[in-house]
Structure formats: C-alpha cells, structure tokens
Amino acid sequence: MKRTAFIAFIGRPNVGKSTLLNAILGEKVAIVSKKPQTTRNRITGIHTVGEDQMVFLDTPGVHKPRTKLGDFMVKTATDTLSGVDAAVLVVEAREAVGDIEASLIEKIKASGIPAILVINKIDAVRPANIAKTIEAYAAAHTFEAVIPISAKHGKGVDTVLEECGKFLYESEWFFPDDILTDQPERQLAAEVIREKLLRLLEEEIPHGTAVAIEEWKEKRDVISIRAEIYCEKASHKGMIIGKNGATIKTVGTYAREDLEKMLGTRIFLDLYVRVKENWRDSDFTLRNFGYNEEN
C-alpha cells in the first residue's frame, strides 16, 4: 500500500529550513548560507522509503519585502500552505512569538492543515530558552508535535521525519522512487553558483545578484556550462570579479566542485558578470530569471 503526503517548510529567513531539507534527504538539493533570504523559489525534496513517499516543499523565508522579488518570495511561501497536507513551522528559540510567526500561524489555521513546530539551532541556546519558546508557541496554537532540533548537526531530524510520517495517506506516488528533487539540472547549477556568491560577497551585494545558464553542452565525460551573473550596479560588478579576477575565479572553483559531486561528471564552468539595474523590481526581468508564479 503506497502512501504519500505533501509537507511545507515555512518560517522567517535564515531559520534553517533548507538545512533541514538537505539533512532529511541526505543530499544537497537546496542551497544554504548564513545570509537571510537565500531561498527564492519553492524547492521540492522527495523522500521515499519502502512504500512511503514524503514530498517536502522548502519555501522562501517570509519577511517584509522591499522589492517585487521580495513580494514574489513571500507570496510563494504563503500560497504553498493552500496546497499541502501539513506544515512544518521552523523557528529559532525566542521568548515570544514574533510578528512573522504569528501571521504564519494564522495562515495555518485558515488553511485548516495540521502543523508541527520545529525549534532549530538548539545547540546555540540554553535549555531555559527552549522551554520559554515552547511555552510561548503552545499559547498561540495547538501543534501536532513540538520538536527541538539542530539541523546542522542532524540532531532531532529523525524525529521530524517520524512525526511527518503521521500525515501520510494512501495514494499513488507523484514522483519516481529514485529522485530527490524535481529541479532541472540547469536550475540546480544556477543556484549552486548563487550560493557561492552569497558566501563570498559581503552585505547586500549578493541579494542583488541572479544567475542565468546561457549554454549547456553535454559531451561523453564533461558538461560545459556558460553562466551569466547579473548584478544591479557597476560597482558591484567589480566586487564580484575581484582584483585580477580572484573572486569570480573562487566562485567558479567552489561551484564546479559542488556540481561535479551532484552531477557525477567533470564540469567546465565559464562565468560572466553583467549589470542589469533594478532587475529585482522589473516584472519582465523577474520572469526571465524564473521568478514567476508558474515555477
């Protein structure tokens, strides 16, 4: 008897939703960084064991948007709740329920779906803080389970899986049993490159970047990829390239190493940097970069 369930990971930026997804799958399908608003699109992760298939939807962090890209990200996250069987609200230990979390709880209630509360990064706080967090959220909503975890170190991840298994229902699967994500390889490559920009660049610069795969050629033992990195200011272009091209070379090296592990073949990666001012507020450009409601 096959069973399945669609489960959304929601929460504010940088609480560890993507880290949790990767930990559950045992492979990297969502990029992560210490900077907020890393995830821009909804990422599907597929966990299949025996007759059970759980489909996890990692959503962008909910925040107060300042651009049309931000509007798209928040809408993607909140709209996901209307099409899933359950939700996992991921939070950090705080003494009170934040405004963003309170709004998400209201949307969970309005959707009528069951929800689990996951308190992440417990390795960085005292047990007393965790207890206060549990107390605060218990007053806000009746969760099916409350699970303190450290996704980065794998603590409590099995418990999350166990509790999510309670949402499974009898159904044919929606995906083959041998895939972890439905993301196209081109999208995975673009996201890996953007992850390296997030890690290597400071402050707001990486949030104004987008990556487009312009050429993808597969040969017998190598994939040749030409990617263009877009930024919003000419001064940012110089920082992305770096002195004597040092930064862009490092981005390319790190991205190539990750992609070779993910795709199982040699990668030739050619990177270019272009300036496209205010692209985050251009409907046309957002669609071209894949930030649209159809994705």
Image (cartoon, grey):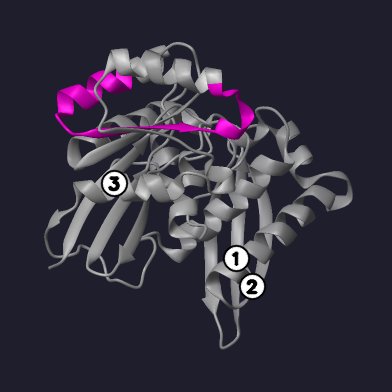
Query: The N terminus appears in which quarter of the rendering?
Result: bottom left
Q: Which residue is mark 1?
A: 259
Residue type pointed to by label 1: Leu
**Residue 196 within the segment the image draws in magenta:** no
Res 1 seen here: yes
**Residue 113 within the segment the image draws in magenta:** yes
Residue type pointed to by label 3: Cys
Q: Are marks 3 and 1 in contact (CB under 8 Å)?
A: no
Q: Which residue is mark 2?
A: 267
* Secondary structure of the residue carrying numbered label 1: helix
Task: Name the residue: 53% across, 52% down.
Answer: 191
Q: Residue furthest right?
A: 244
Q: Which residue is mark 3?
A: 164
Q: Is residue 2 left or right of residue 232?
A: left
Task: Name the residue: 58% across, 54% down.
Answer: 192
Mark 2 / mark 1, whichever is N-terminal: 1
Residue type pointed to by label 2: Ile
Res 295 seen here: no
* Secondary structure of the residue carrying numbered label 3: helix
Q: Are marks 3 and 2 in contact (CB under 8 Å)?
A: no
In the image, is residue 138 above or below residue 14? above
Q: Between marks 3 and 2, how big is the CA–CA gap?
A: 37 Å
* Secondary structure of the residue carrying numbered label 2: strand
Mark 3 / mark 1, whichever is N-terminal: 3
